[in-house]
Image (cartoon, rainbow, N blue to C red):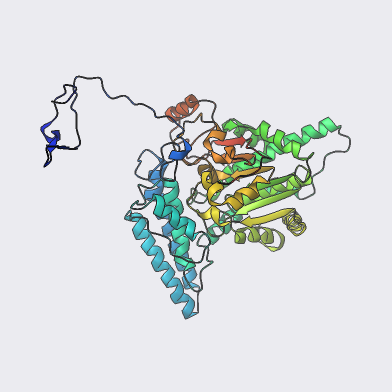
Amino acid sequence: MSANGVKLPVSAQPNTGPAGHSAPSKVTLHLGHLPSKKDIKGPWPRTPTRIDPNNPPWPAYRGYHEYSFAHATMGVRLPTILGKAIDDTFRTLNEQSSEDKVVDLVQCIERMDVLMTDLSGNAKLRPIIDDGEADVALWNKEIAKFFQGKDFMNAPWLFAEAYKYRRLHEAFSVSKHWADYDVFYRQKCDTFSRSSDAVFELSMRFAEPFSLGEHLSPAERLEAERLMFLELTQVCLWGNSTDLSLLINMTEEQIKSLQSTGGEHLAATEKNILGNHLPQVWDTVRELRHKTGGRIDFVLDNAGFELYCDCVYADFLIQSGLATQIRFHGKRFAWFVSDVTKKDWEWLLNTMVYGHLFPNVTEQERESLRRLGQRWKQYEREGKWVYEQHPFWCTGYTFWDLHSEAPDLFLHLSRSDLVFFKGDLNHRKLTYDCAAPASTPFDVAIGPMASAAGAPKICSLRTIKSDVVVGLESDELAEKLDNEEDGWKISGKYAVVLLSEGRPGEKVRFA
């Protein structure tokens, strides 16, 4: 009999040790007449001392959670993406003539096959081989500290997915001839070439330098500028619809529908921005003109059409004087299928100026694209546009750890007047990709990126394509969509534009 009068099962009776001391054992209580267990919610967010990559501020999404998009991604999408990458690499193999290169690429394919076996067989996560990349130490420190013994399905989805892409890069980075090979390059180029309607919709409007009528009063000019800003912010937002990791099997007509950039379409889609800080973002940007050297940063997402939309937006910010410098942050190597690399950046600008990617267009349309590209390349020469890449962007860490694991990058971003984080993956990394209540304020959800001294103002432009949703006015809105519209969190139909005021101007401090 226990102290409280509840009879213990025989299997749980105390064991008596050699000196008569009781050895502890697990006690199981069978309490059939008491009230049923209650679903008691813990105190969220957790205190910072309890947060780490395997223990996020709210419960993590993991691959074995069948109710989440993590399950479909780890079990179906990632093997499909990897299979297509292997097929594309075989195409490259068949184009080679040098035996040395052929043998080297065959070995890369063999390493991809091993990754497929590990992914499909839910293998444990091993350390990254030292391939000379600057992120190896960060990866292996995180694996050793938080993921020993974890496999693809029980590690947090965000980390496991990033690990898969890092292993894919490793398959090539340890080779002699193919270290810089981008397995997704063909797909990214093809997607931009299939976006002709939307590409020329924008180029024909913005080929000539932006100007407002001289007859307008200052108030009228500001209002015209505000409306242009709001519309182009939406173009930049919905350009994220063409995410190759999600739209692998889409037809050309479906892609064109997603990329519609007409004014009526944008007015209709604004109602689908569930967390909408557009007015506050405008207020933030409008004030930059009165500062010396307004700097805006873009942490980029997808190559191709989305990058093109980002550049149209950045062009307007420069021409209108709302910013004097734009810094674009891309990935060092192929990442999550369609993320921007330096090669993608250079390809876009040079294709616009010199290429013939769109054979069935008028000479006027072709010239509009060429002029746009020439102006953007001039921005680069003048230092108004700067493309950058930092190893941290291709690690498994979320941005909650940016301050501690990449202090140089945090300090660099702290000097920006506004940082746009584009797309779903960046949003997941900002918010730790966990099951926070939908009403969680954005500045709470992004933790140190809002609360650390010197944290810049941050705007997340994200079409919703995965489980995490924060910044909504109420949890009831999310619950209503859960009940009425199955799959709303992964459809790309809805979006958020969320702003964090940060703590700009404060001296950045590191422990």
Task: Specify the quadrant of the image occupied by residue 485.
Answer: top left
Residue at horizontal 61%, vertical 33%? Answer: 270
Residue 391 drawn above or below residue 261: below
Horizontal relation, residue 118 to residue 377: left or right: left
Horizontal relation, residue 319 to residue 232: left or right: right
Q: Residue furthest front?
A: 19
Q: Position of residue 417 (x, y in %)?
A: 69, 42
Q: Residue furthest right?
A: 215
Asked whether residue 418 is in view, the answer is yes
Q: Nearer the viewer, residue 291 or 281?
A: 291
Asked whether residue 305 is in view, the answer is no
Q: Position of residue 437 (x, y in %)?
A: 47, 31
Horizontal relation, residue 332 to residue 226: left or right: left
Q: Nearer the viewer, residue 299 or 76?
A: 299
Q: Position of residue 34 (x, y in %)?
A: 22, 20
Residue at horizontal 58%, vertical 40%? Answer: 452
Task: Specify the quadrant of the image occupied by residue 6.
Answer: top left
Horizontal relation, residue 132 to residue 454: left or right: left
Q: Nearer the viewer, residue 136 or 276?
A: 136
Q: Residue furthest bottom?
A: 99
Q: Position of residue 220 (x, y in %)?
A: 82, 31
Q: Nearer the viewer, residue 403 or 498?
A: 403
Is the N terminus in the top left, top right, bottom left or bottom right quadrant? top left
